[in-house]
Amino acid sequence: MTVVRLHPAAAVTDAVKVYGIGATQVRALDHVTVEFPAERFTAIMGPSGSGKSTLMHCAAGLDTLSAGSAHIGGTELGTLNDRRLTELRRERIGFVFQSFNLVPTLTVRENITLPLDLAGRAPDAEWVDALVDVVGLGDRLHHRPAELSGGQQQRVAVARALAGRPQVVFADEPTGNLDSRSGAEVLGLLRQAVDTMGQAVVMVTHDPTAAGYADRALFLADGRLVDSMDAPTADLVLDRMKAFDTPAAATRATTLTTVPPTGNQTTSSPTTVPTAATGPRESDRR
Ligand SMILES: Nc1ncnc2c1ncn2[C@@H]1O[C@H](COP(=O)(O)OP(=O)(O)OP(=O)(O)O)[C@@H](O)[C@H]1O
Ligand SMILES: [Mg+2]
Protein backbone atom coordinates (compact mmCIF):
# COMPACT_ATOMS: atom_id res chain seq x y z
CA MET A 1 0.00 0.00 0.00
CA THR A 2 1.36 3.41 -0.86
CA VAL A 3 0.85 6.00 1.82
CA VAL A 4 1.26 9.60 0.78
CA ARG A 5 2.06 11.96 3.60
CA LEU A 6 2.12 15.64 2.83
CA HIS A 7 3.37 16.80 6.19
CA PRO A 8 5.07 15.40 9.27
CA ALA A 9 3.01 15.75 12.45
CA ALA A 10 5.36 18.48 13.65
CA ALA A 11 8.62 20.03 12.50
CA VAL A 12 11.06 22.82 13.22
CA THR A 13 13.33 24.26 10.55
CA ASP A 14 16.56 26.11 11.29
CA ALA A 15 15.17 26.86 14.72
CA VAL A 16 17.02 29.37 16.90
CA LYS A 17 15.91 30.34 20.40
CA VAL A 18 17.80 32.98 22.34
CA TYR A 19 16.82 33.86 25.90
CA GLY A 20 17.86 37.16 27.47
CA ILE A 21 19.95 39.97 26.05
CA GLY A 22 23.59 41.09 26.11
CA ALA A 23 26.04 39.30 28.36
CA THR A 24 23.36 37.09 29.92
CA GLN A 25 22.13 35.80 26.57
CA VAL A 26 21.60 32.04 26.30
CA ARG A 27 21.30 30.36 22.90
CA ALA A 28 18.99 27.50 23.89
CA LEU A 29 18.44 26.31 20.29
CA ASP A 30 21.11 26.79 17.67
CA HIS A 31 19.84 26.08 14.15
CA VAL A 32 17.90 22.88 14.80
CA THR A 33 16.03 21.21 11.94
CA VAL A 34 13.97 18.15 12.74
CA GLU A 35 10.77 16.44 11.64
CA PHE A 36 8.50 14.44 13.95
CA PRO A 37 6.72 11.98 11.66
CA ALA A 38 3.09 10.93 11.97
CA GLU A 39 2.52 7.57 13.65
CA ARG A 40 5.99 7.54 15.18
CA PHE A 41 7.37 7.79 18.69
CA THR A 42 10.36 10.13 18.92
CA ALA A 43 12.49 10.57 22.06
CA ILE A 44 14.54 13.72 22.63
CA MET A 45 17.57 13.19 24.82
CA GLY A 46 20.54 15.23 25.98
CA PRO A 47 22.19 16.66 29.08
CA SER A 48 20.42 19.12 31.38
CA GLY A 49 20.31 22.54 29.75
CA SER A 50 20.86 21.15 26.23
CA GLY A 51 17.57 22.65 24.99
CA LYS A 52 15.20 19.67 25.07
CA SER A 53 12.29 21.46 26.76
CA THR A 54 12.90 24.56 24.68
CA LEU A 55 12.69 22.50 21.49
CA MET A 56 9.48 20.88 22.66
CA HIS A 57 7.91 24.14 23.79
CA CYS A 58 8.75 25.90 20.52
CA ALA A 59 7.59 22.95 18.41
CA ALA A 60 4.29 22.90 20.36
CA GLY A 61 3.63 26.63 20.18
CA LEU A 62 4.06 27.13 23.93
CA ASP A 63 7.02 29.42 23.21
CA THR A 64 8.12 31.31 20.12
CA LEU A 65 11.34 30.92 18.15
CA SER A 66 13.84 33.78 17.76
CA ALA A 67 14.46 32.64 14.18
CA GLY A 68 13.44 29.77 11.94
CA SER A 69 10.00 28.17 11.73
CA ALA A 70 7.86 25.61 13.52
CA HIS A 71 5.03 23.65 11.91
CA ILE A 72 2.20 21.50 13.23
CA GLY A 73 1.13 19.55 10.18
CA GLY A 74 0.92 22.08 7.39
CA THR A 75 0.42 25.08 9.68
CA GLU A 76 3.32 27.42 10.37
CA LEU A 77 2.97 28.56 13.98
CA GLY A 78 4.65 31.92 13.36
CA THR A 79 1.77 32.98 11.12
CA LEU A 80 -0.86 32.59 13.88
CA ASN A 81 -2.01 35.26 16.30
CA ASP A 82 -2.37 34.35 19.99
CA ARG A 83 -6.00 33.32 19.69
CA ARG A 84 -5.41 31.04 16.71
CA LEU A 85 -2.34 29.58 18.39
CA THR A 86 -4.35 28.78 21.53
CA GLU A 87 -7.01 27.13 19.36
CA LEU A 88 -4.40 25.10 17.51
CA ARG A 89 -2.85 23.90 20.77
CA ARG A 90 -6.28 22.85 22.08
CA GLU A 91 -7.39 21.14 18.91
CA ARG A 92 -4.26 19.57 17.47
CA ILE A 93 -1.80 19.02 20.30
CA GLY A 94 -1.89 16.88 23.44
CA PHE A 95 0.44 17.55 26.35
CA VAL A 96 1.82 15.37 29.13
CA PHE A 97 4.02 17.02 31.75
CA GLN A 98 6.31 15.63 34.41
CA SER A 99 4.07 16.98 37.17
CA PHE A 100 0.78 15.53 35.77
CA ASN A 101 -0.99 18.96 35.88
CA LEU A 102 -4.44 17.59 36.62
CA VAL A 103 -7.12 19.89 38.01
CA PRO A 104 -7.56 18.80 41.65
CA THR A 105 -11.24 19.77 41.93
CA LEU A 106 -12.31 17.75 38.86
CA THR A 107 -12.90 14.01 38.70
CA VAL A 108 -10.82 11.67 36.54
CA ARG A 109 -13.41 11.73 33.78
CA GLU A 110 -13.77 15.52 33.91
CA ASN A 111 -9.99 15.90 33.74
CA ILE A 112 -9.82 13.64 30.69
CA THR A 113 -12.43 15.64 28.79
CA LEU A 114 -11.29 19.08 30.04
CA PRO A 115 -9.39 20.14 26.89
CA LEU A 116 -12.43 19.20 24.78
CA ASP A 117 -14.76 21.07 27.11
CA LEU A 118 -12.53 24.13 26.95
CA ALA A 119 -12.52 23.93 23.17
CA GLY A 120 -16.32 23.66 23.12
CA ARG A 121 -16.07 20.23 21.48
CA ALA A 122 -18.40 17.44 22.51
CA PRO A 123 -16.33 14.50 23.75
CA ASP A 124 -16.72 11.35 21.69
CA ALA A 125 -18.09 9.18 24.51
CA GLU A 126 -17.09 5.89 22.85
CA TRP A 127 -13.56 7.10 22.31
CA VAL A 128 -13.25 8.38 25.89
CA ASP A 129 -14.57 5.04 27.18
CA ALA A 130 -12.02 3.21 25.05
CA LEU A 131 -9.23 5.39 26.42
CA VAL A 132 -10.39 4.88 29.98
CA ASP A 133 -10.24 1.14 29.31
CA VAL A 134 -6.77 1.37 27.83
CA VAL A 135 -5.39 3.36 30.75
CA GLY A 136 -7.10 0.96 33.17
CA LEU A 137 -8.96 3.56 35.22
CA GLY A 138 -12.54 2.44 34.64
CA ASP A 139 -13.15 2.03 38.38
CA ARG A 140 -11.65 5.43 39.24
CA LEU A 141 -13.63 7.72 36.96
CA HIS A 142 -15.30 9.59 39.79
CA HIS A 143 -12.22 9.92 41.97
CA ARG A 144 -10.27 13.15 42.26
CA PRO A 145 -6.54 13.28 41.45
CA ALA A 146 -5.52 13.42 45.15
CA GLU A 147 -7.13 9.98 45.58
CA LEU A 148 -4.86 8.44 42.92
CA SER A 149 -1.22 7.33 42.93
CA GLY A 150 1.30 9.26 40.84
CA GLY A 151 1.28 6.57 38.18
CA GLN A 152 -2.52 6.60 37.99
CA GLN A 153 -2.53 10.40 37.75
CA GLN A 154 -0.08 10.28 34.87
CA ARG A 155 -2.24 7.67 33.12
CA VAL A 156 -5.14 10.13 33.42
CA ALA A 157 -2.88 12.80 31.90
CA VAL A 158 -2.07 10.47 28.98
CA ALA A 159 -5.78 9.78 28.42
CA ARG A 160 -6.44 13.54 28.54
CA ALA A 161 -3.71 14.14 25.96
CA LEU A 162 -5.23 11.50 23.65
CA ALA A 163 -8.90 12.41 24.19
CA GLY A 164 -9.08 14.94 21.36
CA ARG A 165 -7.21 12.68 18.86
CA PRO A 166 -4.50 15.33 18.45
CA GLN A 167 -2.11 15.47 15.54
CA VAL A 168 0.78 15.07 17.98
CA VAL A 169 1.32 14.43 21.69
CA PHE A 170 4.26 16.18 23.34
CA ALA A 171 5.46 14.72 26.64
CA ASP A 172 8.18 16.40 28.74
CA GLU A 173 9.75 13.80 31.04
CA PRO A 174 6.42 12.03 31.61
CA THR A 175 8.06 9.39 33.81
CA GLY A 176 10.31 11.81 35.73
CA ASN A 177 8.20 11.61 38.92
CA LEU A 178 7.28 7.92 38.69
CA ASP A 179 8.76 4.70 40.00
CA SER A 180 9.96 2.29 37.35
CA ARG A 181 6.79 0.17 37.30
CA SER A 182 4.43 3.14 36.92
CA GLY A 183 6.85 4.63 34.42
CA ALA A 184 6.74 1.44 32.35
CA GLU A 185 2.93 1.57 32.34
CA VAL A 186 2.87 5.14 31.09
CA LEU A 187 5.50 4.41 28.43
CA GLY A 188 3.56 1.32 27.38
CA LEU A 189 0.47 3.49 26.94
CA LEU A 190 2.32 5.99 24.77
CA ARG A 191 3.75 3.13 22.70
CA GLN A 192 0.28 1.63 22.33
CA ALA A 193 -1.12 5.01 21.24
CA VAL A 194 1.43 5.04 18.42
CA ASP A 195 0.95 1.42 17.40
CA THR A 196 -2.82 1.09 17.61
CA MET A 197 -4.12 4.65 17.23
CA GLY A 198 -1.52 5.95 14.79
CA GLN A 199 -0.63 8.72 17.23
CA ALA A 200 2.53 10.80 16.79
CA VAL A 201 4.37 11.12 20.11
CA VAL A 202 7.37 13.29 20.95
CA MET A 203 8.89 12.67 24.39
CA VAL A 204 11.68 14.46 26.21
CA THR A 205 13.47 12.12 28.60
CA HIS A 206 16.73 11.64 30.52
CA ASP A 207 16.08 7.95 30.90
CA PRO A 208 17.63 5.46 28.43
CA THR A 209 14.96 2.89 29.34
CA ALA A 210 12.22 5.36 28.39
CA ALA A 211 13.99 6.17 25.13
CA GLY A 212 13.98 2.43 24.41
CA TYR A 213 10.21 2.63 23.83
CA ALA A 214 10.67 5.11 20.98
CA ASP A 215 11.14 4.49 17.27
CA ARG A 216 13.89 7.05 17.13
CA ALA A 217 16.02 8.94 19.64
CA LEU A 218 17.46 12.38 18.93
CA PHE A 219 20.36 13.75 20.93
CA LEU A 220 20.77 17.44 21.71
CA ALA A 221 23.89 19.12 23.12
CA ASP A 222 24.32 22.86 23.63
CA GLY A 223 21.19 23.61 21.63
CA ARG A 224 22.29 21.57 18.62
CA LEU A 225 21.05 18.28 17.25
CA VAL A 226 24.20 16.17 17.45
CA ASP A 227 23.04 12.63 16.76
CA SER A 228 20.11 10.31 16.18
CA MET A 229 19.43 6.61 16.62
CA ASP A 230 16.75 4.49 15.01
CA ALA A 231 15.13 1.67 16.97
CA PRO A 232 16.93 2.67 20.16
CA THR A 233 17.34 0.25 23.05
CA ALA A 234 18.19 1.26 26.61
CA ASP A 235 21.69 -0.25 26.26
CA LEU A 236 22.46 1.46 22.96
CA VAL A 237 21.20 4.80 24.28
CA LEU A 238 23.23 4.41 27.48
CA ASP A 239 26.37 3.68 25.43
CA ARG A 240 25.70 6.74 23.31
CA MET A 241 25.21 8.94 26.36
CA LYS A 242 28.51 7.68 27.82
CA ALA A 243 30.17 8.41 24.50
CA PHE A 244 29.13 12.04 24.77
CA ASP A 245 30.89 12.33 28.13
CA THR A 246 34.42 12.13 26.73
CA PRO A 247 35.54 13.63 23.41
CA ALA A 248 37.72 10.60 22.56
CA ALA A 249 34.87 8.22 23.22
CA ALA A 250 32.54 10.40 21.18
CA THR A 251 34.85 10.12 18.18
CA ARG A 252 34.98 6.35 18.56
CA ALA A 253 31.19 6.11 18.84
CA THR A 254 30.72 8.19 15.70
CA THR A 255 33.06 5.90 13.80
CA LEU A 256 31.23 2.84 15.03
CA THR A 257 27.85 4.17 13.99
CA THR A 258 28.77 4.64 10.35
CA VAL A 259 28.13 0.95 9.70
CA PRO A 260 25.63 0.01 6.96
CA PRO A 261 21.91 -0.12 7.86
CA THR A 262 22.13 -3.86 8.39
CA GLY A 263 24.32 -3.17 11.43
CA ASN A 264 23.06 -1.77 14.68
CA GLN A 265 20.33 0.45 13.22
CA THR A 266 22.04 3.68 14.17
CA THR A 267 22.84 6.69 12.06
CA SER A 268 25.57 9.19 12.74
CA SER A 269 23.98 12.10 10.96
CA PRO A 270 21.01 13.92 12.47
CA THR A 271 19.83 14.88 9.02
CA THR A 272 19.68 11.31 7.74
CA VAL A 273 16.12 10.23 7.02
CA PRO A 274 15.65 6.90 8.78
CA THR A 275 14.60 3.79 6.95
CA ALA A 276 11.95 1.57 8.49
CA ALA A 277 13.06 0.47 11.91
CA THR A 278 13.26 -3.28 12.22
CA GLY A 279 15.89 -4.22 14.78
CA PRO A 280 15.58 -3.97 18.55
CA ARG A 281 12.00 -2.65 18.61
CA GLU A 282 10.60 -6.15 19.09
CA SER A 283 6.89 -6.64 19.29
CA ASP A 284 7.27 -8.24 22.71
CA ARG A 285 8.04 -4.86 24.15
CA ARG A 286 4.69 -3.44 23.23
N1 LIG B 1 12.86 31.29 30.26
C1 LIG B 1 14.19 31.21 30.18
N2 LIG B 1 14.97 32.30 30.35
C2 LIG B 1 16.30 32.22 30.23
N3 LIG B 1 16.98 31.10 29.95
C3 LIG B 1 16.27 29.98 29.78
C4 LIG B 1 14.84 29.96 29.88
N4 LIG B 1 14.40 28.71 29.65
C5 LIG B 1 15.50 27.96 29.41
N5 LIG B 1 16.62 28.73 29.49
C6 LIG B 1 18.00 28.27 29.26
O1 LIG B 1 18.04 27.64 27.98
C7 LIG B 1 18.87 26.48 28.03
C8 LIG B 1 18.07 25.26 27.62
O2 LIG B 1 17.07 25.03 28.60
P1 LIG B 1 16.04 23.82 28.53
O3 LIG B 1 15.07 24.01 29.64
O4 LIG B 1 15.53 23.72 27.16
O5 LIG B 1 17.00 22.58 28.83
P2 LIG B 1 16.63 21.04 28.99
O6 LIG B 1 17.48 20.28 28.04
O7 LIG B 1 15.17 20.83 28.96
O8 LIG B 1 17.20 20.77 30.48
P3 LIG B 1 16.63 19.79 31.64
O9 LIG B 1 17.06 18.41 31.24
O10 LIG B 1 17.37 20.26 32.86
O11 LIG B 1 15.15 19.96 31.74
C9 LIG B 1 19.43 26.41 29.46
O12 LIG B 1 20.70 27.01 29.48
C10 LIG B 1 18.43 27.21 30.25
O13 LIG B 1 19.04 27.79 31.37
MG1 LIG C 1 13.72 20.25 30.39
Image (cartoon, rainbow, N blue to C red):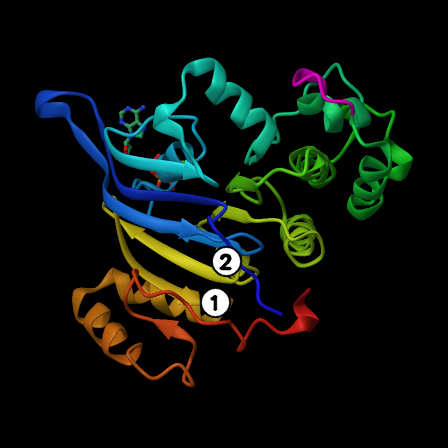
Q: Which percent across, then down, holds residue 91? A: 60, 28
**Assess mark 2: CB under 8 A from ligand 1?**
no
Mark 2 or mark 1: which comes first in sequence? 2
Position of residue 38 relative to residue 65, above or below, is below
Please say if the residues under marks 2 and 1 sit with CB atoms less than 8 Å apart.
Answer: yes
Q: Residue furthest left?
A: 23
| Residue 129 or residue 284, whichever sits in front | 129
What residue sits 15% from the left and 27% below the top?
Answer: 25
Is 119 colored magenta in this rendering?
A: yes
Is 144 colored magenta in this rendering?
A: no
Based on the displayed image, in which of its 4 quarters is residue 152 positioned?
Answer: top right
Q: Is residue 249 left or right of residue 142?
A: left
In what quadrant of the picture does the N terminus appear? bottom right
Q: Which percent across, then down, holds residue 24? A: 14, 24
What residue sits 57% from the left and 71% below the top?
Answer: 281
Report the image quarter containing ligand 1: top left
Magenta-colored segment: predominant secondary structure? loop
What residue sits 34% from the left and 71% below the top?
Answer: 267
Q: Is residue 53 visible?
A: no
Q: Which percent across, then down, holds residue 236? A: 43, 71
What residue sits 69% from the left and 64% below the top?
Answer: 286
Q: Which percent across, then down, holds residue 8? A: 47, 49
Based on the displayed image, in which of its 4 quarters is residue 62 positioned?
Answer: top left
Q: Name the amino acid, label 2.
A: Ala
Q: Which residues are magenta?
A: 117-122
- Residue 258 badge: none
**Residue at image mark 2:** 211
**Residue at image mark 1:** 232
Label 1: few (<14), some or many (≥20) within 10 Å? Answer: many
| Residue 85 or residue 43, whichever sits in front | 85
Name the element at disc 2. Answer: helix
Gap between marks 2 and 1 measured at Cα: 7 Å
